[in-house]
Amino acid sequence: MNRKKTTNRPTRKRYQDMSLAELREATKEFDAEAVNPPSRPLTVDERARFKRIVRGAGRPKVGLGYQRVMVSIEKGLLGEADKAAKSQGVPRSELIALGLRLVLKTKKRKSA
C-alpha cells in the first residue's frame, strides 16, 4: 500500500508561480538589512569550540613559550642557514635555536 506522507504545514506556491504582489509579500522578510540578526548565547561546548578556532593552531608551546626577536644576520649566512634548515626538514627558527643551544652547552662545558 502506497501512502503519501501528510504534513500539517500548509503548502506554499513556488516563487515562479506567484504574482508580483504575492512574491513581494512572501519575500518581505528579506528586505530588511540584516545588520544584527537575531542570535542566542553560545552553549558551553560551542564557546569552547569557538575559542579553539579563534586561538588557531599556532606554534606549540615548548619550554616557557617563545619570544620574537629582531636579529641582524649576514645575507650569505642566512642563505646557508635556510638551505641547511630545508635539507634537515626543520624551520629556520628551530635551526637557529639548535645552534644557540649548542653554543651555550659548549660554553657551559668550558667554564665547568
Image (tube, rainbow, N blue to C red):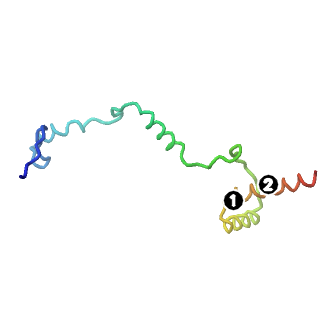
CA gap, disc 2 to disc 1? 14 Å
Q: Residue furthest left?
A: 1
Task: Check disc 1 and give the amino acid type.
Answer: Arg
Q: Residue at x 73, y 62 (%)?
A: 78
Q: Position of residue 13 (x, y in %)?
A: 10, 44
Q: Count every numbered label the image shows and give the total.
A: 2
Q: Is residue 65 left or right of residue 47?
A: right
Q: Position of residue 48 (x, y in %)?
A: 48, 38
Say the numbered circle drawn on residue 92. Answer: 1
Of tags 2 and 1, the one toward the viewer is 2
Q: Position of residue 43 (x, y in %)?
A: 42, 33
User: Dot 1 surroundings within 10 Å: few (below 14), some, or many (20 or more)?
Assistant: some
Q: Is residue 100 left or right of residue 54?
A: right
Say the numbered circle drawn on residue 1. Answer: none
Q: Residue at x 93, y 51 (%)?
A: 111
Q: Residue at x 65, y 65 (%)?
A: 89
Residue of label 2: 101
Classify 72 as above or below 49: below
Task: Check disc 2 and give the amino acid type.
Answer: Arg
Most foreground residue, 57 or 69: 57
Most foreground residue, 42 or 18: 42
Q: Is residue 104 left or right of residue 110?
A: left
Q: Residue furthest front?
A: 1
Tell me which numbered mark, 2 or 1, is placed earlier along the sequence.
1
Query: Which structural element holds mark 2?
Result: helix
Q: Are marks 2 and 1 in contact (CB under 8 Å)?
A: no
Classify 39 as above or below 81: above
User: Dot 2 surroundings within 10 Å: few (below 14), some, or many (20 or more)?
Assistant: few
Query: Which structural element holds mark 1?
Result: helix
Residue 80, picture quadrant: bottom right
Residue 88, picture quadrant: bottom right
Q: Position of residue 66 (x, y in %)?
A: 69, 46
